[in-house]
Amino acid sequence: MTDILSFKLLDGTSIPWLACGNGSGQANKVPVEGGMQALANGIRHIDTAQIYGTEEATGQVVAASGIPKDEIYVTSKRTYVALSLPPDRVLTAGSPYNTVSALPNDQPVPLDQVRASVEESVRRLGFVPDLFLVHNPFVAPPGQLKALWKIFEELKSEGKLKSIGVSNFRPQDLEAILEDAKFKPVVNQIEYHPYTLTHLQPVLELQAKHGILTESYGPLTPILRHATGGPLKPVLERIAERLIKVTGKTVDLATVLLLWTRAQGAVAVTASGNADRIKALADVSRLPDLLEPGEVEEITRVGKTVHFRHYVCV
Ligand SMILES: NC(=O)c1ccc[n+]([C@@H]2O[C@H](COP(=O)([O-])OP(=O)(O)OC[C@H]3O[C@@H](n4cnc5c(N)ncnc54)[C@H](OP(=O)(O)O)[C@@H]3O)[C@@H](O)[C@H]2O)c1
């Protein structure tokens, strides 16, 4: 697809390791400008969702970019009944839109509306997304997660969806759909960074057993949202200083965290609505493996001593 490293998914397709999302912060407010800048700078993976209200903008960006669609990877997510997006659809970090208990139209989606809802996503985007996720386990009516997944599987078999996966799934949710799955979910998109590792251990073990790739949202949480940065901050600072000396380039703590995410074999789903930062993220996406194995291990080890998460999806 491009010179950006990709990971292989269970279904044989490949996914670029760094995505720019348009569901959070400034990126959600300027999805067209941000998306155009991301693509112009070489990023080739955009993460959108029904609830972000940015599927149409994502489609516009891809169409206007002049880049063939098959060179741009797009993920979207099933969240709500078609046509019922709230007018104020901004998802900011920590906003109630990202908490299951406070979802607008806080109703599980009836299964007979799933197909129409997926068709709406495809219409808004202007193409079938490369990856389509169940946004969280609560979009299915209680006890019907498996039935929802069956519909995803049918849509994939019919060629109406490509890769299919899940987001914010706990071990019990994965187990429910894996029981007799025709297609295993290729990814689970979760809040993943060093400060969630201990808490996530059961779900990460299950994913490893089944070959389900982790997509990390909120990868910069330890440096952006933890009040002090915690014990990881001095570790990241020391590593960044070494990399500045080795590369002669500007290397910030975000770069180190993103490289750590990649070293874990996880896709980093980050975001920015700031032109300079988007360019910096594109530069990071093309970096070689700069972290030494001992540095990767140290970030993991120190990260596991703290439990801190920002999002409260599940
Ligand atoms: N599946 C889910 O339930 C779920 C939940 C949450 C998020 N997501 C997806 O994940 C995406 C990213 O989530 P996130 O915002 O939590 O990711 P993040 O990578 O932890 O944080 C991104 C934020 O960091 C800032 N930033 C970017 N590069 C930076 C740098 N080099 N140094 C310092 N700050 C930097 C950006 O602000 P500026 O705009 O000011 O640059 C942006 O608001 C979302 O847009 C969405 O697509 C999915």
Image: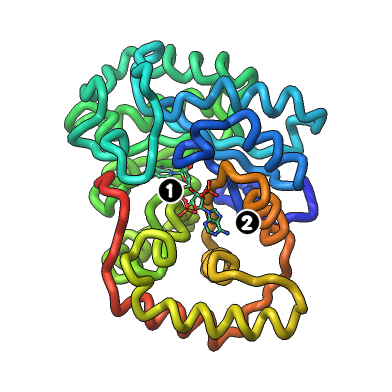
At label 1, counting other C-alpha atoms closer than 10 Å, the crowd grade (few under 14, some 14-19, many 20 or more) is: many
Residue plotted at (36% across, 22% down): 88
Mark 1 CB within 8 Å of ligand 1 = yes
Query: Of the residues under marks 2 and 1, which one precedes in the sequence?
Result: 2
**Where does label 1 land, which residue?**
189
**Residue at disc 1, secondary structure:** strand
54 up-or-down from 239: above or below: above
Residue 29's spot in the image, x, y percent? 50, 31
- Left or right, 203 with respect to 185, comes to left
**Where does label 2 land, which residue?**
7
Residue 154's spot in the image, x, y percent? 46, 25
292 up-or-down from 128: above or below: below
Q: Can residue 212 be seen in this view?
A: no
Q: How far apart are marks 2 and 1 (CA)?
A: 14 Å
Q: In which quarter of the image is residue 133?
A: top left
Residue plotted at (65% across, 39% down): 73
Q: In which quarter of the image is residue 141?
A: top left
Residue 108's spot in the image, x, y percent? 24, 24
211 up-or-down from 152: above or below: below
